[in-house]
Image (cartoon, rainbow, N blue to C red):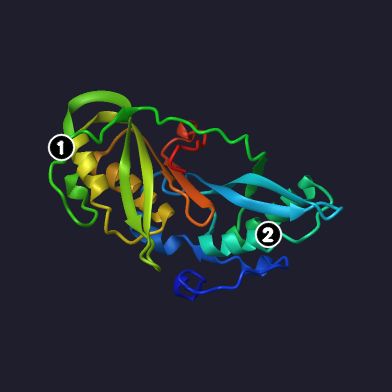
């Protein structure tokens, strides 16, 4: 099924009975066709924080938690966000023998939708800590020029000096390709190779402001454009998007597995 057939942008009744068939998978490969030969485009993780999780214990008492989902980047499908929200809401009045039973059910359902093993870690509502961004902050640079849509020509090398650095920007903005709603995020770029021009990179990030693309697809396009145009030896691109509908999505793509980050939650999330 196409994403136009999903529940995005449609008035929907919230289910009050467990409904795993509401999950809507979206194939990853069509959006990856032009990046098929880019090393690492299928390497990494998508982390989701789910803030609206509740179920009933055997005595009928509501239980609540914050969840962190981990989807492998090489899964055949991502899961459309509104269907995921409705799925978790469908469990609000369902009895589970234990937290572990709830967890096992979620992992089974989401793994089936994604086509690969999905894990969920459950946190007490006071447990998930807020972190501060680490790295070189580039938003105070003057962009080389401003464009309305992603333009890889904005990317440039500063010089031939070999460096390893982590850059970050809070200015990532794109639009949902179905509803047109804005998605905001912080993007981290760690690389090893010839020094990247920070002003050009900032201009490139800003150029996504009117781009239509899912979170995962935007991160993969950023990763692919840097890899193909600037040719670093190693690369990591990680975006922490702000919450919408009780969910935030945090994709990470890496050229080398040992550069995979540990997921964090920033203050805007």
Dot 1 crowding, Cα within 10 Å, few <14, some 14–19, many 20+: few
Residue 109: image tag? 2
Residue 34 shows in the view: yes
103 with respect to 74 (left or right): right
Where residue 216 appears, as percent x and y from the top left, is 43, 53
Q: Residue at the location (47% across, 55% down)?
A: 244
Give 162 or 252, whichever is nearer the viewer.
252
- Asked where in the image residue 226 lies, by quadrant, the reply is top left
Residue projecting furthest to the right: 59
Where residue 7 appears, as percent x and y from the top left, is 52, 71
Residue 80 shows in the view: no
Describe the element under mark 1 as helix, strand or loop: loop
Disc 2/disc 1 C-alpha distance (Å): 47 Å
Residue 142: image tag? 1
Q: Residue at the location (45% across, 74% down)?
A: 4
Q: Residue at the location (32% across, 51% down)?
A: 173
Give 197 or 242, whichever is nearer the viewer.
242
Specify which label sits upstream in the sequence, 2 or 1: 2
* Above or below, 110 relative to 65: below
Describe the element under mark 2 as helix, strand or loop: helix
Residue projecting furthest to the left: 145
- Asked where in the image residue 110 lies, by quadrant, the reply is bottom right
* Above or below, 40 relative to 87: above
């Amino acid at each position: 099924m196409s994403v136009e057939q999903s529940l995005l942008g449609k008035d929907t009744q919230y289910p009050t009975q467990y409904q795993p068939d509401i999950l809507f998978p979206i194939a990853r490969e069509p959006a990856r066709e032009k990046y098929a030969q880019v090393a690492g485009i299928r390497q990494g993780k998508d982390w989701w924080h789910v803030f609206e999780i509740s179920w009933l214990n055997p005595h009928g008492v509501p239980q609540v938690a914050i969840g962190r989902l981990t989807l492998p980047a090489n899964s055949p499908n991502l899961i459309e966000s509104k269907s995921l929200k409705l799925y978790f809401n469908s469990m609000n009045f369902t009895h589970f023998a234990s937290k572990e039973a709830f967890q096992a059910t979620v992992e089974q359902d989401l793994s089936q939708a994604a086509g690969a093993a999905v894990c969920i870690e459950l946190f007490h509502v006071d447990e998930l800590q807020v972190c501060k961004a680490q790295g070189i902050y580039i938003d105070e640079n003057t962009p080389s020029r401003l464009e309305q849509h992603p333009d890889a020509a904005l990317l440039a090398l500063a010089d031939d000096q070999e460096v390893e650095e982590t850059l970050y920007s809070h200015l990532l903005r794109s639009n949902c390709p179905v509803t047109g709603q804005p998605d905001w995020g912080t993007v981290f770029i760690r690389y090893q190779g010839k020094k990247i021009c920070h002003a050009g990179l900032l201009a490139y990030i800003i150029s996504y402001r009117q781009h239509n693309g899912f979170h995962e697809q935007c991160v993969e396009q950023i990763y692919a454009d840097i890899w193909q145009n600037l040719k670093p030896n190693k690369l990591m691109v990680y975006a922490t998007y702000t919450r919408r509908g009780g969910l935030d999505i945090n994709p990470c793509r890496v050229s080398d597995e040992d550069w995979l980050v540990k997921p964090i939650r920033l203050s805007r999330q």
